[in-house]
Amino acid sequence: MIEALSRCSTVIDEKKLEERLAVVEAARSWSPRVVSRLETLLRSGTDEALYRINPIEFAREKSIAEAEGIDLFLHACVAGLFDMDWLLVCPMCSDVVESFRSLRKLHTHFHCHLCQSDYDAALDDYITVTFTVSPTVRSIRFHRPDALSAWDYVFHYKLTSGGMLPDGVPWSEAAKQLVRLLTRIEPGSTLSLEVDAVEGALLGQDFESDAQFLFPVARGADAALPHVPVTLDGGQCMAAPANIAPGKVAFDVHNAGKLPVIFGILQLPVATFQRQKLHFGPSLSGKRLLTTQTFRDFFRSEVIGATEGIAVLDVTLVFTDLKGSTALYERIGDLNAYIQVQRHFQHLLDVTVRHNGAVTKTIGDAVMAAFLTSADAVRAALDMRETVEQLNWDRPQRDFILKIGVHRGAAIAVTLNERLDYFGQTVNIAARVQNLADGDEICITGDVYRAPAVAEIIAPYPMVKSEAELKGVSKAMSVYHLARLETGL
C-alpha cells in the first residue's frame, strides 16, 4: 500500500532529469542501453529502489560490468542525479550507524546502539558507499526521515538489506519476525504498549540510543505490576522491576526527553539471545572507491578528515620508474623529453584503469598506482611493460625502459599535499622493491606471489627468486624477478 501511494505521488522534475541524463550520456562511451537503464530506474523505480543504491548490485542486475556500473553512478552524481553517502555499517545487525555526504567527515570509530558495541572501521570493512536520487530530480519519502513511519524508519532507513545470516536470510527480514510493536513516541508523551509475551525474553529498544530494557518471560512468574512503567530520557531507560509470565503485558513508556523516540518491543527466543556475525554481499567499499580512477578525477576536493587517516587492511601498490630518463633528457632536450614522459604517463594511466586500479600520484618519472587485488596489479604491471615497449617501436633508440615493483599489505589512507594518498610500511616496501628491478623487469614480493591467481598469471614468464634485505624491514623478503618473454624476433 505504501509503495502504491509512493508511486502515485511521484513528482519528477523533467527538465532537470533530461538535462542531467544528457550530461551523463555525453561523459564517456557507454555500453549499449546503460544510460537508458538508469533512466528507467529514475522514472519508475520505487522509493526503496532509489535509496542507498548499491552500484555493484545494480550492475549485476542489469548485466553491466562492475567497473562501468561504478563509473555510471559517479558520473550521475557529478551531474546532479544522485547524492553519494559514506555509510558506517554495523557488522552484527547491518544498522547504518552513521552516514556522511563527504569523505572529509567520515570517522572510523563508531558505536552501534542496537548491538551496544563499538567498532573500528577500515576502508575494506564496515564502510560502504551508496547513491540516493537527488531531491531536486525526484523526491522520495526517505528524503524526509522525520516524517517516516516507525516501521519505515527502522527497516528501510536504519537497517540495510545487505547483511545476511548464515542461511542466506537478510537479518533485516529475520528481525521483522521478532518485532511485536514499533512506534514513535513524541517528547513528553506516554504510550501504553501492550504485547502478548511468550516464553523467552522481551527487549525494549530505543533505535537511536543505548536505552533498552530486557525482561525474561517464564512460566510461573507473576507480573509484579499490571503495567510496567518505563521512562526514556537522554539515552537512558529506567524500567520498574517486574516478573513477566507468558500472556498479555503492558509497558507504560514515557518519553521524558526533548526529541521523538522510535521505540520497539521485540520477542526474543531466550534472554541470552545472541546475534551471529553477518556476511555481506558485494558492495562498493571505501577501498574500492579509492582505487577507482573516476572517483579520483572527479572528487579531487575530497580529503580524509580523520587526523590518524583511515586504515586499509589489504591494498596492492605498483611503483614504476623509467630507467635512463636522465640520458633521455640530455639526448633530446628537456621539452621533447617532458612531452614523451607525459605520453608514457598517459599510457600507464590507461593500463591502470583497464585493470581496475587508480593512479595515486606521479613523482618525477615514476608512477604509484593502487589496486583492489594483487591479480589486477600484476596483470597491470605486465601490461604496462608491454605498452611502454610499444612506445619504442617508432624510435631510433629504446628511450622507455620500465622498472616495476609490486607489494601488497595494509596501509593508511591519508590526505597529503591536498591529494588522497597512502602511507605506511607497505608503501615504503613497494617503492624499495621497484628499486631492486632492473630495466624491463618486474619485481613482486612473496605477499603478492601468494595472492589468489597470481602464480598462474606469471607462470609463463622467466622468473628468478631472491631474498632481499630492504631498509627498514627487519628480515629478508622473498622477491620474484619477472623478465620479459622471449619473442624469438
Image (cartoon, rainbow, N blue to C red):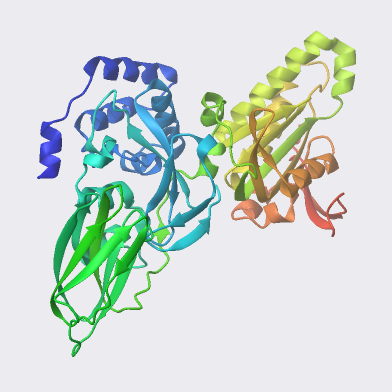
The percent position of residue 335, horizontal first and vertical second, equals 79, 9
Question: Which residue, as the protein is rendered here, is positioned at the far bottom?
Answer: 220
The percent position of residue 75, horizontal first and vertical second, equals 43, 25
The percent position of residue 218, horizontal first and vertical second, equals 22, 85
The percent position of residue 387, horizontal first and vertical second, equals 67, 28
| Residue 443 seen from this side | no
- In depth, the one of 5 and 57 nearer the eye is 5
Q: What residue is drawn where x is 32% and y is 50%?
A: 158
- In depth, the one of 449 and 7 nearer the eye is 7
- In depth, the one of 319 and 280 nearer the eye is 280
Q: Is residue 325 left or right of residue 192?
A: right
Q: What residue is drawn where x is 69% and y is 28%?
A: 417
| 301 vs 396: above or below | below
- In the rendered image, the quadrant that contains the C terminus is top right
- In the rendered image, the quadrant that contains the N terminus is top left
Q: What residue is drawn where x is 44% and y is 20%?
A: 28
Q: Is residue 146 left or right of residue 482?
A: left
| 98 vs 235: above or below | above
Q: What residue is drawn where x is 87% and y is 26%?
A: 324
